[in-house]
Amino acid sequence: MQVLVTGGAGYIGSHAVKVLLSKGYEVIVVDNLATGHVEAVDDRAKLYIGDISDEVFMDKVFKENDIKGVIHFAAFSLVGESMTNPYKYYENNVSKTNKLLKSMVEHNVLNLVFSSTAATYGEPEKTPIYESDAQVPTNVYGQTKLAMEHMIKWYGSAHGLNNVALRYFNVAGALEDGSIGEAHNPETHLIPIILQVANNKRAKISIFGDDYPTKDKTCIRDYIHVLDLCEAHVLALEYLFNGNPSDNFNLGSGEGFSVLEMIEAARKVTGHPIPAEVAPRRAGDPAVLIANSDKARKVLGWVPTRENIEIMIRDAWCWEQNKRY
Ligand code: UDP
């Protein structure tokens, strides 16, 4: 069965391609390479380089293949950039998704798994966060993802587009063999930056704030291995193929780790002292973000197997040392 992965040359998309292939799916990738890497796309996938908003191009993709479902990752995802350039985020994330949905409906491809985010919740009122909690984004990136969720729901009621939105918490790790992994430019995420220090590519890690109301005063996040996350995407797609109703699911581990704990775990995994210094808070960072993901476990039958942060750091470390792109 053929599945289209938009953004399949990106960090999470490229891992999803691997997981889909391992489960016997034929994979079509569409990526405009704005932030993706050709080298990240498995050779067994059929890669189309182009834009999801190019209707002529997407007509060709849908006509040349027999696509039964779409996993939609293609988006920009830098919070800081979204705050200074909202046009770029509304145009790329919202407007282009609108075009993609139009093409899907025209070609009668009516199963969609959407890559959403914990950023749609904003500053949570309580911990852990449930799917039914209020979604009040505090940044443009989260707001565009929420707009995309809403748009998809309206296409659901207007055109019968069956959909699942997966709201991720902090995605980490890489394929175990280190052949693909996270490669953002600029890199802003905690684990890759810590590991660049361990790999002597940076002098130290800055801890953004040590005055939060948490056990060690640094921010707490819920980390999830990229392969566990991608398994959930395939389960969500199969859930839709089986005729189940559209829904939303959180994807996280339910356990929180502070910035200091992550640095300590990386010291243990890499054997490097990883110098750290306290820096001012980063604007817009909530103190604690932890998911309740019981619904994904119960309804989708999701069983994450790599919930240990040392496993995530070990796999990311393997990638950091083998980086090809
Ligand atoms: N963080 C940090 N130093 C860095 C990068 C991130 O202290 O160089 C902190 C950040 O403030 C947040 C946590 O690490 O509390 C995770 O940040 P990341 O950017 O990886 O993910 P986010 O939670 O923003 O999605």
Image (cartoon, rainbow, N blue to C red):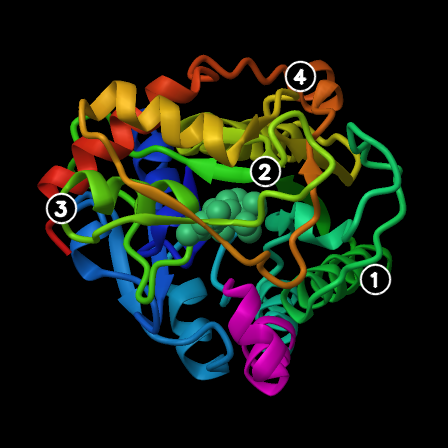
Residue 157 lies, with reference to residue 248, above or below; the image says below
Q: Amino acid at mark 2?
A: Thr
Mark 4–mark 3 Cα distance, whole angstroms, equals 39 Å
* Element type at mark 4: helix
Mark 1–mark 3 Cα distance, whole angstroms, equals 49 Å
Residue that mark 2 sits on: 218
- Measuring 59% from the left and 55% from the top, which residue is drawn there? 109
Using the image as rendered, state which of residue 46 and residue 138 is in the foreground: 138
* Element type at mark 2: loop
Q: Which of the 4 image quarters holds residue 198? A: top left
Q: Which residues are magenta?
A: 77-94
- Measuring 41% from the left and 59% from the top, which residue is drawn there? 7
Residue 27 lies, with reference to residue 78, above or below; the image says above
Q: Which badge, 3 or 2, comes first in the chain's sequence?
A: 3
Residue that mark 1 sits on: 154
Residue 268 position within the rendered picture, expressed as x and y whole percent measured from the top left: 28, 18
* Labelled disc at residue 200: 3
Q: Nearer the viewer, mark 4 or mark 1?
A: 4
